[in-house]
Structure formats: C-alpha cells, structure tokens
Amino acid sequence: MKKNNLAKKIGKAVLSQLPKIILLLIILVGVIVVMNYKAPAEHEEAIAPYAYTGEQEQTVIENDELKLVMDNATTEFSIEVKDSGKVWYSNPKDAASDPIALTDEKALLQSPLVMSYSITQGLETTYNSFGYSAQNGIYEIVPGDNEIRVNYSMGTVSKEFTIPPVATKKAFKKLLKKMDKKDADLVKQYYKKYDINKLSKKDNKDELIANYPIIEESVIYVLRQKTKDATKQQMEELFAAAGYTYDDYIEDKALDMSSTSSDNPIFNASIIYKLDGKDLVVEIPYEDLAYDKETPIYTITPLPYFGAGGPEDEGFIMVPEGGGATISFNNGKTAQSSYYANVYGWDKCLKRDAVVHDTRAYYGVYGVSEGEDSFICILEDGRSYAAVQADVAGKNNSYNYVNAIYSVNQREKYDVGDIANSDIYEYIPELPNETLRQRYSFIGSGSYVDMAKDYGSYLQNEYSGYLDMLDEESTPVAIEIVGAIDKIKQIVGIPVSRPLKLTSFDEAADIVTQLSDSGVTNMDVKLTGWCNGGVKQKLLKSIKPIGALGGKSDLKSFISTAESKGATVYLNGITQYAYDSNIFDGFFSFRDAAKLISKERAQLHEYSHITYAERENSNNTYYLLHTELADSLVSNLAKTADKYAAGASFQDLGMDLSSDFYRKNTYSRQAVLNLQTERLKSIADAGTPIMVNMGNDYAVPYASMITDMDLRGSEYTILDECIPFFQLAVHGRTNYTGKAINICGNEENEVLYSAEYGAGLNFTFMEETSFATQKTLYTDYYGATFDAWKDKMLEIYTRYNNELGHTFNQEMVDHKNLSADVSRTEYADGTAVYVNYGYSEFVTEDGVKVPARDYMVTR
C-alpha cells in the first residue's frame, strides 16, 4: 500500500513538473540545433571573362543616315553623319600622344567605357576599358542587325582561355573521348603527362608536388607553358564542344599552385551601339553587369570623351545648369572646379553627412558644338541615376569633354567609430532589371539654338499630344495665396501648434477679384496652406479645409469667383513627405516612411548654413513617405481637386525624386520616376489641370503651369554663358515662371530673368501683414502682404504684359548673348527682347538703346 502511495506521489510530482521538463527539452533541442546548424554555402557563380578573337580589323554598321566604324583592336569608333560628312569620334584621335596626360590618363582617354568599383570601407577604384580590357584581350565584339554589342571584362588579369591548366587523368581522358581523334591528338601534343611513380630524371618531385598537390593522388596532365594564344584559342573551341565549362576551368585552375592567383576583382559589362535613324543610341543593360558582391560596381560612364574638343578646336560644351549654360573650349579656367550636377537633384533616400551646395538639373541633356556641327546627348532610361560632368582642357589632359556618370550601386555610410577606424558602407543588395540608355542626336549646325530646337522636336515626338502650341494671348501669371501657417500657441499653459490664418477663402476671392478688375488676366492661382494644418500639411489621407479660413462652401465660392474672372485655382498639397504628422493623422512612421538601404526609416533633417551638417536636434525633422503611400496621396489630392472643380498643385511631385528601399516593395529611383509619370499622365488625361514646382522634364508635358523654374541656375566660374536652352525647346507649349518676384530677395533680377527666358510672372500674396509671421518659421513671407505689394505688382505686370503678352503662344526662335551683361531673345513673329543686367546703358549694333538694369522690346 505504501509503495502504491509512493508511486502516486512520484507520478503527481512528475506530472506537475511535466510542462517545465518539456520546455527544458525544447530549449535543449534548440541549442543543439543552433550549435550544429551550418548555413547553406552560397554558390558564387564565377565571372567568366570574355576573349577577343582578333579575326577582323574593323566592324562596320550603317543606315541611310549614319555610318559607324569600330576599331576591333581597341573598340574605339567613329561615326559619320552622311548629310554633312561630319565625323565624330568616341575618343580623341591623338590621345595616346597627349603631351599633358600621364599614362593612366591616356588609358582613360582611349576608353569608350569607364567604371568604378567600391568596397565596404568606401574606397573607390576606377577601371577603364582600354587599360583593363582591350589591352588584355578580354572582350568580344558581337555585330548584329544595325547594332554592335561590345562585351567587356575589366580587371588586372592576363588573357585567359577556358581550357584545363591542369587535369586529372580521368577527367582529361573523358574530355578527349568526346573529341574526334584528330582533335584529341592535337590537344595531347600541348599537355605533358606526370605520374609521380614514373618521373624522369629531369623532373623535380618536390617541386611538382608543391606546384600540383593532386599529383600524389592521380596522374595529371599539365598545359605546356610555351603554348601560343592562337593554339589556346583553337583548343578552347574543342574543349567547349566537348562540354568543358568555365566552372570546370575554375576547378582545374585551383589544382595549379605553380602561379599565384590574383585577388584583384574582375567585372563584366556590355555596351550596345544602335543606329536609330539619325540617332546613335547607346545602352548598358544591368542584367549584363557581373561583379563580386564584395566589390560592387559603383559608377559607370559610357563614352566619357565622345566628341571631345582638342586644344586647337573651336566650340563649346552645353550643360543643363538652370535653363542651360555653355563652357567654351580651352577657356583657360583650369584653376576652377569641374562642372557637376545631379539630374533631378539628390535622392532623399540616400544619407549624406553635409550639404554645401545642392547641385541639380531638371532635364537630362548635354551637348557639344564644334564648328558648323553639333550633337546633343539625351539621357533616356536610367537618367535618374545620372550626373552630368564636364571640364576644360589643360588640367589632366588636352581635351574639353562632357559626359554622364551613372550611380549603379547606391550605398549608405555607417559610423562605426567605436569598433573600427574607418567608415563602413552598405550597398543595395541587387540591381533592378533596368537599362541605361542615352541618345546622341546629330545636328548640322553649331548653334545652341538649333541644338535646343532639336531637343524640342524630341520632346514633341516623345510626348505626342501633350506639348501642342498654346493659344495664350496674355502673360501667364502665377499667384500663390497663402491660407494658413502653423504657430505655437499656449493653451492652458501647454504649447500647441495651431493654424494661423493669413488669408481666408473670402479674402482670397477678394484678392483675385481686385487683380482681375485691375486688368490682370490669365491667372493661375495656387492656394497654399488651405487644409490639414497649414503650409506644412499633415498627411493627406483625409483632406479637410482649415476651419479658420472658412467652410467648404466658402472654398467653393472662392473657386467659383476665380473661374468667373478667368482664373484657375489649384489646391496645393504635399504628397511625398510627412510633416508634423502622427498616428492620429493616419501616419505611423514604422509603416509609412520610406526605408533607407539600412532599412531604417527615411527621417530627414534640415542642414545648417554654417556647419553644413544635419541639424539633428532641430524640430523641423520630417519623413520621406513610402512610394505606394505617396502615390495614394497624389490620387487623394487630385480627387479632392476634382470635387471642388479645381486643379491640383503638387508642392514636391515633379521636383523631388527619391528611391525607396522598403523591404517588401523596393522602388528604384527610375521606377519611382516611371510611376510618377504615369500618375501625372492619368490625372492630365482625366482633365484635371496640374501645377508643379521646378518642372523636371518628365512632369513638364502634363503640367498646365510650372512655377519656380530654375531659370539661371548657379553661375559656376567654369561656365562662360547662361542660355535658355530648355526654354527654347518648350516655350509656347507650356506655361512656366521663375521664382515669386516679391519674396525672392532680388525682384529686379527676377523680372529680367523672366524677360530673357520667356517666363510668365510669379507672385506670392497673403492678406495679413508681415508682422503675423513673426516668431514663426515662415519669415519667407515677409514681402507677401497683398496691400503693400498690389500697386508694384500691377506696375510690373502691366508693362510686361503690354510688351510681351503676345509672345506666349509663339516659339522662341533665337537667343544671343551680345555681351557679358546683355542678351537678345527673339520670337517667331520677329519680336526681340533685349535684357541688360549691367549698370550702364548698352547700344546694339542696330542702334537699339537698352537701359541699365532693364529690358527693351522691339517689334
């Protein structure tokens, strides 16, 4: 009985502890599994280098317009424009004998393709196709129907052939059996057999074991050292036919310890040249880029010296700075920094430590003029990754050049100062399935006006139906009316951000009415700060007008009043960023923010004007939104605009462009560009008027009005002239303005810029006085009080419209800089606009007197 009771007690004790025992066993099993787990080995596919056969001296393709002749020994080429007879060269003809260039620089000058790779520490190394591919013979030329593909392998390697350097007897015999007897006999002649048990007196056993350790296990066959490349090439074909692969070659190469293998990386890249009518199209497919993940390709530059001007040549380079700018060949500015500008500015999803100056171009075009001929290079696919760079002769070489450099593997820097002495970089895990494409259009004229017109024709063909001539009969005027800003107020002793009214909807209607009654026509009215908290709107998931400005009926009444005065109202919205938004506004940063490469949230900061570094402690931090959320906000704004019978104004879309490394839904910068383009197109096709800032080239065709276009750009010292290249291409087909004249800081210059560049006028107004913006972050509106500026605005507008209003439905047909301070712009009907930025009167050769700091119109 006692035994039974004892057994029951033990049983109960065991049962009571059973959950703990089971948990302990699970943990124990888990520990054992973790300790014995081996991650599956990643199979790195070997990068097989290309090999040049050297069968022909040249490869030629041509059509009715162009003839391209490639030197197969270097892959350099010339292209003849048949109409004019002009021949352009991919590389300077006398590069090898350049008296200024050093050896490495000469190799760069002779390279149709240049790339750089980087490592974890961020160190960047440049490879060029001449020194690292052509001279090594590790490339191949593949002619096609009206195209040539050049496959480059670049690296510090000797020319390799996919044949066994060493092979075991079993493997070697297996390959020979798959060959004809004649071919097998040929191959055997160039291999020496070694059997460790049957060595000759001349064989050094210890040396053989050191060089070929496999000899202790098997009889081996070793390729004879004096075998010529031509024979290796012949055998490569025989081995390939027998099923021998590059991976087999890598395995056999590992058996050969007689020569030390190089740790230097090797890269594969292909460049395709296509003749497309009168144009040369150059493509670099991402799918053909091969590299080791430890040494990713960082940048690629196709045709870096195409059309480069020599020390005796006369011509200029056109770069997309502002509306456009030129750099004269051999201008002697060798002490100045090179020209560099990111297309569409900085990608906000890439971190940077400091900002000294934000370089940006809102269109991807550059060009070269030489004598009576020129070309423009239009960056097509992949232009969002590009930066345009240019320099003059006399620095590192004797040539003036311009090109586009593409950022391939974007990267992000980590500060690991606590555990390492250097920075650590992380790169994007894989490339998108995209292609870099740029188009060279050849022009039988050396004039930048004709170059711009050629670009205009391209845009009209590319966006057929969206850049038709306008029927404007007066100056387009953009009027921004500021509704409300946010200001900190004390509520029960607690500081709270609340909207501060600057202009109510009724007051906005009154402003438009006063301007209309004073003779201002063709107004596009941007209503800023009208909803969701003010100028820095909260997330536009739910869009609600600010009650302090009036009700929905007041907003509708304002829009109706403006329409009756012939004005179009655009409701302005922020769609790519989250300012001062939280979970109660529908914003959850962990879910809704875009992600950096590190998968951290894309939290953005302002930069100090003193230290240029991030102001991390600033209250003005904000987030870049996840691409799909941003796209939905664009739709929300457009639908709301339709609801109120207004247009949609996008504060950031069409100006800022950023990628998104969100883990589940990654968007490359080019993918975001394509998405935004389709969204803008769909909104325009639905009949909703669109207003954008800056006007990146992909947004221009769909916009009814572009404000704050960068007309002049940054006047870098290396530049020689500012020109309205982009405006020559689009004037009369879309309306655009420069900065708001009354708050830009230099109203006189802005009016002169507008006159030279054929821009409309832009003003920003509010009903309240500038005192209302004190102790806020909106002192930019210091000059925006309508009553204070009304008379001055009407004076500027009346003269401008009377003299230039008739030109906005015409093409700009000519432009010339008459001096460093005076320009002349001409329109289709013969109207000429002279602009004098100088401080003294200028008299033209025709006797036209242009007053100082003024413009003069002749008809």
Image (cartoon, helix red, strand yellow):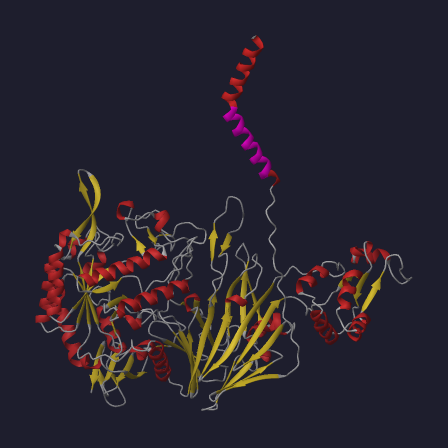
Q: Residue at x 50, y 54 (%)?
A: 425
Taken as a whole, is the magenta stretch helix, strand or loop?
Answer: helix
Q: Position of residue 687 (x, y in %)?
A: 23, 69
In this rendering, position of residue 521 left or right of residue 401: left
In this rendering, position of residue 175 left or right of residue 829: right
Residue 459 visible in the displayed image:
yes
Quarter of image, res 747: bottom left
> Is 22 one of the magenta-colored residues?
yes
Q: Where is residue 385 in the image (x, y as percent from the top left)?
A: 43, 65
Query: Between 845 and 290, which is closer to the camera in this rendering?
Result: 290
Quarter of image, res 637: bottom left
Instruction: Tell me how many marks there are.
Output: 0
Residue 723 visible in the displayed image:
no
The single residue placed furthest to the front in the displayed view is: 1
In which quadrant of the rendered image does the N terminus lie? top right
Bounds of the magenta span? 18-34
The single residue placed furthest to the top in the displayed view is: 2
Query: Between 497 and 472, which is closer to the camera in this rendering?
Result: 472
Q: Where is residue 843 in the image (x, y as percent from the top left)?
A: 25, 85
